[in-house]
Amino acid sequence: MNFIIQHKKTVIYLTGGLLLALILWFILKPPVVGAYRVEQGDYVPSLLLSGEVIAEQSSVLSAQIAGMVMDCPVKKGEKVSQGQLLIRIDDRQLILDRDRAAAAVEMARSQLQKASTVTLEEARASSVQADLARDKAELEYNRQKALFDGAAISMAQLEEAERNRSISQEKANSARVLMESLEQGGSNLAVLQAELKQRQLDLAEKEMRLSQSRIVAPMDGVLLDLYVSPGELAAVGTQVALVANGQGIRIKIQPDQRYASLAVTGNRAQVWVTNAADTKWEARVVYTEPLANAEQGSITAELEFVGPAPSLSPGQLLSVQIFGAVQPGAVIVPDAFLAVMDGENGVWLANNNRTSFTPIKTGIRTADGVVVTEGLKTGDLVVAPEGRTPNQRVTPREDKP
């Protein structure tokens, strides 16, 4: 009986010990972690960045006269036709100047025609009438000015009075010149002819100035940008708008100058609309800016589509992956195995199933990961970084990158 009891106790102790051993084994068992065996291989360097659709032909428009912007009838992004009004700068004084010049031309032409047909007496009478009309227009302008100052009339009414005063002055001057020419026996015909020519030149100059107050589209296309708004003052030379022809398009990229070796003429790229990577287009670098932007630390390059260009609009943003030439053997580590410890980039290595953190220096990224330029060698076993601590026991399981 005692033998049976002792045997049962032995079985119980053995079973309990076995269970405890199993529990301890499961608790203390080294975790199985993903691992990557470092090896060298050829690779194609690539860079993923944003690009912008630009037009092959575009034009920056600048103000040719100074003044307040009165109207911008076209909105940014809208299609425009050649000659369509984009911006109107305050032209009220320019219209007055043009009208005065036009009246002066008519007076000079009339004066020249009359010089050979009008008698001296008629010229004198005409001069007197013109002086009276001038004085009357001056009085009317002063009256309208007083009304305007008292807010009794509009600016348009005051401008009309000023226009009439200017025309009356021109008529009085012309009548006096004609009278003086006849008093000298008509010897001033050459002077009258020269004056007509000068008046015509002055009118042409005033009309040109008026046309400069109207900034129009130089081509059919799209208004890409508008740099001014109604109410703003535009100085001579101020850039006011950007118009593109909307026909041929390119992609502009601005990679960091460290990656200038990728933005080389002839290098291929893939382009797609951001968040719509199902459709990709082939492109090639066709232009690289010779000098880097020192302030931004970047360079500018342009790409053209290989084959027919897709239907994209200037200003649209795209994702661009640009590829360099095949490079000889290098150490590449997949992104999933990269780690950071105490602010230092590195990886976790497994040696004899024990982990250690190793700092690394990296170079350009590839489609398979990042090129490691210092810190690793062929054959090193890199393990997944999640949950790693120094000298941790692990069971590496090599994964394909």
Image: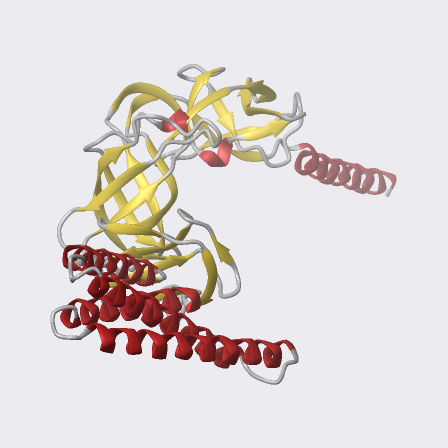
Residue 54 visible in the displayed image: no
Taking 19 as reference, is 218 above or below it? below
Residue 337 visible in the displayed image: yes
Taking 400 as reference, is 209 above or below it? below
Instruction: Tell which of 15 and 183 is nearer to you.
Output: 183
Residue 130 shown left or right of residue 24 in the figure: left
Rendered residue at 33%/66% (across/down): 173
Count of labels in the image = 0
Rendered residue at 36%/52% (across/down): 64
Instruction: Tell which of 285 and 156 is nearer to you.
Output: 156
Find residue 113 and report its horizontal and vertical position in percent. Answer: 14, 71
Instruction: Tell which of 33 and 326 is nearer to you.
Output: 326
Residue 218 shown left or right of residue 355 in the figure: left
Find residue 125 and report its horizontal and vertical position in percent. Answer: 30, 78
Assign the N terminus to one quadrant of the image: top right
Q: Residue furthest right?
A: 2
Assign the C terminus to one quadrant of the image: top left
Quadrant in which residue 146 is drawn: bottom right
Q: Residue furthest bottom?
A: 152
Find residue 123 and report its horizontal and vertical position in percent. Answer: 25, 74
Find residue 224 and report its horizontal and vertical position in percent. Answer: 35, 58
What's the colour scheme? secondary structure
Taking 43 as reference, is 121 above or below it? below
Rendered residue at 30%/31% (across/down): 289
Instruction: Tell which of 113 and 232 is nearer to you.
Output: 113
